[in-house]
Amino acid sequence: MNKWTKLTLPLLQPIAAIMVGLLAGAIAIMIAGGDILETYAEMWKGAFGGMYFFTNTLSRATPIILIGLGAAFAFRAGFFNLGAEGQMVFGALSAALVGLYMPGPGWLVCIVAIIAGIVAGGLWSVMAGYFDARFRVNLLISTLLLNYVAVLFAGYLVAYPLKDRSGSAAMAQSEMLDNSVWLPKLISGMPLHVGFVLAVLAALIIFVLLKRSVIGYEVRMLGGNPLFALFGGVKRGPMMLGAMFFSGGLAGLGGAVEILGSQYRYIDGALSTADYAWTGIMAALLAGSHPIGTLIASIFLAALQTGGMGVERNTEVPLEVGAIIQAVLILFISARFTYSFLKRRKGNKSDGTAV
Amino acid sequence: ACGNDDKSTDTGAANGGSEGSQDKKRIALVLPEKIGVNPFFALMDEGLKKAAADFNVEVKTIESTDPASIEQNLRTAVAEKYDLIITSTFQMEDALKKVAPENPDVPFAIIDTVVDLPNVRSVVFREHEAAYLLGAAAGLATKTNKVGNVVADDIPIMHKYMTGFAEGAKSVNPNVEIFVNYVGGFTDPAKAKELALLQNSKGADFVAGLSAVGDLGVFEAAKEKGFYASGQDTDNTGTDPEHVVLAQLKGTDAVVYETVKDFSEGNYSFDIRDYGLKEGGVGLTYVTHESKTPLNPFIGQDIVDQLKVISDDIIAGKIKVTNALEQN
Amino acid sequence: MEQLFDLALINSALRVLTPILLAALGGALCSRVGLFNVGLEGFMLLGAFSAVVGNYFFGNVFYAILFAIAIVSIFSFIFAYLSINLQANVIVVGIAMNALAAGLTTFSLRAIFDVKGAFYDNTMVGLPKWNIPIIEDIPVLGPILAGLTPLVYLSFLIAGLMWYYFYRTKSGFRFLAAGENPLAAKSVGIRVRRYQYGAVLASGVLCALAGAQLSLGQVTMFTEGMTAGRGFIALVATMLGQSGPLGVTAASLLFGFMDALSIRFQGLALPTHFTQMLPYVVTILAMFFFKNKSFQQDALKQGSSSR
Amino acid sequence: MLLQMDNITKKYGEFSANRGIDFSLRAGEVHAIVGENGAGKTTLMRILYGMEQPTSGTIRLNGKEVSFASPEGAIRGGIGMVHQHFMLFPTFTIAENIVIGNEPGSGARFDRKQAVKTVDGLCEQYGMKVDPRAIVSSSAPGVQQRVEILKVLYQGAEIIILDEPTGVLTPLEVQELLEAIKQLSKQGKSFILISHKLNEVLDVADRITVLRDGAVTGVVEKGNTDARQLSRLMVGRELAELDKKTITPGEKVLEVSEVSIRGTKGKPVLDGVNIQVRAGEVVGVAGISGNGQSELLQVISGLAQPDSGRIAVSGKDVTGMSTREIREHGLAHIPEDRYVWGANRTATVMDTGLMGHHRRLQKGGFLKLKDIRSLVSGWVQKFSIKTGSLETSTQYLSGGNLQKLIVARELEQGTPFLIAAEPTRGVDIGAMETIHGELLKRREEGTGILLVSSELTEILKLSDRVLVMFEGRIAGELSAKEATEEKLGLLMAGGTL
Ligand SMILES: Nc1ncnc2c1ncn2[C@@H]1O[C@H](COP(=O)(O)OP(=O)(O)OP(=O)(O)O)[C@@H](O)[C@H]1O
Ligand SMILES: Nc1ncnc2c1ncn2[C@@H]1O[C@H](COP(=O)(O)OP(=O)(O)OP(=O)(O)O)[C@@H](O)[C@H]1O
Ligand SMILES: [Mg+2]
Ligand SMILES: [Mg+2]
């Protein structure tokens, strides 16, 4: 195998998967009676056709990237954190509260709001970690269940005590943030905000951290074989709390920048309907929890969504078919392309103990 | 793009029509959600399609998959140079408040909430008036002095209905007890049905469905246990005339139709239209609007007559119905 | 809202928990062979839809259920093929299948019935509601079991059968072995993949039943997204019950009762949002008592790795 | 010829694990395969058993060409295999583990009572005792090994492959196993035995095939060979004798006092254990596995906590401390189970080798990758660890090579105290020599070593003092001079001197 094939071979698989996925999608379009080429053209335009759409895709990817990175980091350490939604909601809520009620100059409020988002998401996440480390409460279940609790709790706050009474007052939402607090846009008039830069930075930092740092090493070993890590002096308890805080903090950051950069207020259900959390988790799994891979997968998934909206706006192909095409594409791309956490786990599981 | 053929006869008013190829007016309806389970949005879509046929305009309905995509869809509609962009509900307020001032030449309309901008027409409803009538009907008709509300979710907008209902019911029957239960979502008829069954088991003989598609679950419970129910937004008494005895109406289709009509006839103005009982924008079957379904004896003509008086009183301003959203 | 506990509550809880129990049993089968099935929600939704379609076209609930089983089986086969043969990540496949099911049902709703949102037909007859002659008149039991569909009884029967299968039959024993240590199972000639396929297909069948109970048992209609998160609750029940038939049944019972109870708490002192949290909070609290295996035991069992 | 494997080649990418191997087996024969770690022994057997497909070559059984796509086919062809690494279901009972694949019972029903009876009968027939109702994960490794063999016998195999079956057995158990092999081969069963222990091989084998670097370097009849010739064929050189210098022990580096752990069934797992290890001293711990050795090591290294008693490392009380803190106080540890405690299979060889050193080889929280790389590649050379590269996934190392990597890693921690648990388990004789040499070198440098081994020759060869554990207690202590296999054996079985 020469260098050239070594380089292209790993790319071949995802490209082939996308091709087959597009083909399968074409069948769906045909059944729905749409024009295949036009539909795909609109899909492309909706995602990347022009500055507005491109930046919009990146802006949509921002919370997905952050959540994906958080999930990926926890997965790497061997902790299956499925609580991104709740962690994100708490991050968003706290950022909104700080943004609304903290006095002081806008830039300072904004920074504090971001930090509050990270801390809130992190603490909510670390709670599940603590329950597991201390009381052996299954992390998978607790993180999943705490999502419901977080969403309902935040829903209560914005439906009652913190409800926005300034406008029509018909929505369960907080008041709107003053625009001095908003995260600056990267390009004026375009949806992309500074949060995206934070997300890319986070991906790079995690990449270096995992690959080069002592903590990253311990995280990887803990995820690979916790007994080996324990044996070598890695402290699982503190690592678990730390990893869960970091993971939840990233999800919280995702929520915070979505509020400060895009929505400017906490709206009940807005983060859940957009399904950022599961999309982020999916990105992490598609990328085998690799941070840079997660970044790319997140943008890809966001592009599928924005592209789907383009299809809905500009063709007669109904919204549902757009969703079907998205799902089919993801299914094909997940095939074999992934080097997944669970598969790996299955692999390990299968070897029994050693002689 | 669909709409109905024929050649254009539009007199075209309003500015901003800078389209190239054809002379047909193009109108976009941007919705904050998928049409799906909420009859409210389906009605708007219907009104738009009907208007398209009647006024020879080209129309397009754009559904949003989630709140984050609303602004994008609105901006794209502007970029696609639609001549009129109709939006709807408070969910789009934020986006419209951003986009409309940036595009002062583009005419907008928003239905179901007020956005006070020079290029936006706002259309709102006084649903609480209709809810008051429904409550009064329930209060008069109940034999057990117990009635129920099965509500989609505990969110502010729903209180507009519940408060109106309660006021109406108490006004005619101070002893009436009102059970309120929340489904916790807009797509769960099974749960809605359980709630209706529960309310019935506690003695309610009339349950008002306020839970979007969940109302179908309420109707089914009514059928199963032989109590009475009411629907919302559109006249759905036809679903099961024996048990679904009333429907609280909201003429969103008519409002969209009117908007398109005004626009295509050149009568478009940027103001606030407020539709209540008086304007016929909201109502109650048999009382303010005819129904194809024969009146159920549970309500009876006698009660309908009393309700008509109440309706007149509301229109005349003799009865003031509380708008829960304005209470603060 | 004085009486919180009464017999109607239990009756209602039994109705409500049936779809969850059925799906959770399917989830348990999958997780026993190492496939974490987050696609239960989609399976169930598709089951609910195809049951209504079958009912509409065949005019017979039995055929309707068979039709639902056939459709969801095809769907679950795709899940199996992708995650077993093509090595796709099961969670990704599960999430994508959920989206696919949502899209397919909405699309078909329009294509087949030309409606959006909901399909309801007055003439459609749902599952029979049994009032068993003698039991009907027994004081406490009568009201508890009043008007339940055959699927309610079937779900408990299936749980029992599954227990018997796992712990009393050769095939069930091999099934458990294939999940416990696939490599060792292969080394004694067990066809691991066959069991994995079997588990996924069986979970498809169970979810089809769950969907049918929802769309033809609890109500007689289909609405978009009518599973409303029940698949995820079932997933939690699967894990809480540690993928054992009895544990899963107990977990589903807990959920059913907490859900029924939370409804009755509505309108009491607490705001609705908090009463709605009740099932979730109680489950978390329950986990403090039913301890998970320690990660060391877990990892030792797996020869290395953590959950 | 019962079995004939011709010209078997197996390639993993560009690497050939087997290169044109010819191998044959007669009915009733015991045919041993010996060879260095990574020579391709296991690979060849996995091919025969249908777990791997050969890149080229043919297999003939009774003259008929066969090709097994899966173990199922091999089992049907009358081939059974006991793997180098256990293939058991840890949460199942022993009876269940043995009968799986061919369970007793009528129809679909699995009759567990009958399974227990069958297994009891099997134990009787072959003279191997196990408790059919016991759970595998709580049984000693020796027992688990017997379960593996019984499983194969239960399957009715005519050809039985044993891949390093004696690695975890005590001398007595080894003796029993070899006896059983002889008995069974007389009854007509044929055996393929892989082992690094030449005395065992010379004891039971009729023929011996020697592999090196994936190729056959010799096939010899038992009568015509001896250990020297074999080892020369295997490693390509003569092995040197070890010489053990006399050293005066120094400070106490380990002090275990009155350590106890309560058991689940009344019997304590550890019962008032007292042990001292001084600098420059090797203290051997002998005992039949399952008598508390594992727990003792876990308690010392902080992997488990004692219910009572104290532990001091280098004079510091470390009771209740974490593994990290104990390691920082001067402990290194070669674990008894290389996959459970010793390695991360999915990590690279470099990452597995780095554990414990990573906190040292850092600057500002970042790993000094260059230093680490040269350190680990140094070990690879010194212990001739066969690996593709440092980036190779650990799981692809052969058992012996991984063991060498772990030994190298722990020896290099440079601590005053070292636990060496089964340090040469599964390694070839050349590597064993290297490891023994390195252990003695560390002793001379003043390290105190606690050596736990089921290999009595190893204990006798290296130890200055020998402790014998029986039922959680120290049943006796012998000096190097007094200790003999017989005395140790007596103590290990619960007797007194
Ligand atoms: N691609 C497939 N399509 C349909 N069914 C399949 C497919 N692959 C496997 N199966 C089902 O699984 C059964 C067992 O397959 P196979 O023999 O590959 O399993 P195995 O050998 O235990 O697994 P492995 O190949 O992982 O060792 C087949 O008989 C078939 O019923
Ligand atoms: N799946 C694999 N991929 C790549 N290389 C492999 C794989 N399996 C084994 N090898 C390599 O093949 C060689 C032979 O391995 P094998 O396990 O047969 O050795 P062995 O003779 O049994 O050694 P030991 O005595 O240590 O058990 C080793 O160098 C090993 O690293
Ligand atoms: Mg080997
Ligand atoms: Mg196979």
Image (cartoon, coloured by chain):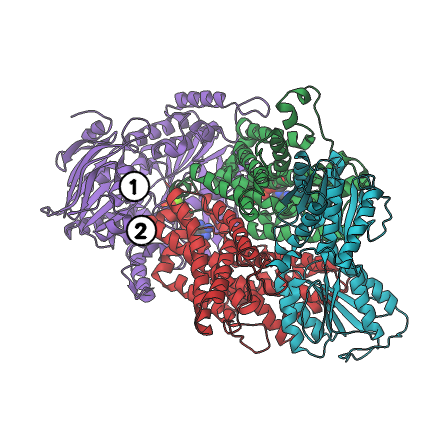
Chain shown in green: C
Q: Residue furthest right?
A: B6
Chain shown in red: A
Q: Residue at x 28, y 48 (%)?
A: D323
Quadrant containing ligand 3 reads: top left
Say which chain tag 2 marks.
Answer: A
Q: Amino acid at mark 1?
A: Ala
The one nearer the camera, A321 or C70, is: A321
Whether disc 1's CB lies below 8 Å from ligand 2 is answered no
Q: Residue B22's quadrant in the figure?
A: bottom right
Q: Is residue C291 visible?
A: no
Local packing at callout 1 (Cα closer than 10 Å; few below 14, some 14-19, many 20+) is some
Position of the N terminus of chain B by quadrant: bottom right
Residue D336 at what x, y percent from top left?
A: 31, 42
Q: Residue C49's quadrant in the figure?
A: top right
Chain shown in cyan: B
The one nearer the camera, C169 or D53, is: C169
Q: Residue B294's quadrant in the figure?
A: top right
Q: Residue at x 48, y 67 (%)?
A: A99
According to the picture, the residue beneath numbered tag 1 turns out to be: D304
Q: Amino acid at mark 2?
A: Gly
Above or below, A256 relative to C176 = below
User: Which disc, if any, is residue B142?
Assistant: none
How many marks on residues? Answer: 2
Chain D color in figure: purple
Say which chain tag 1 marks.
Answer: D
Residue B166 at what x, y percent from top left?
A: 67, 48
Q: Is residue D221 visible?
A: yes
Dot 1 falls on a residue whose secondary structure is: loop
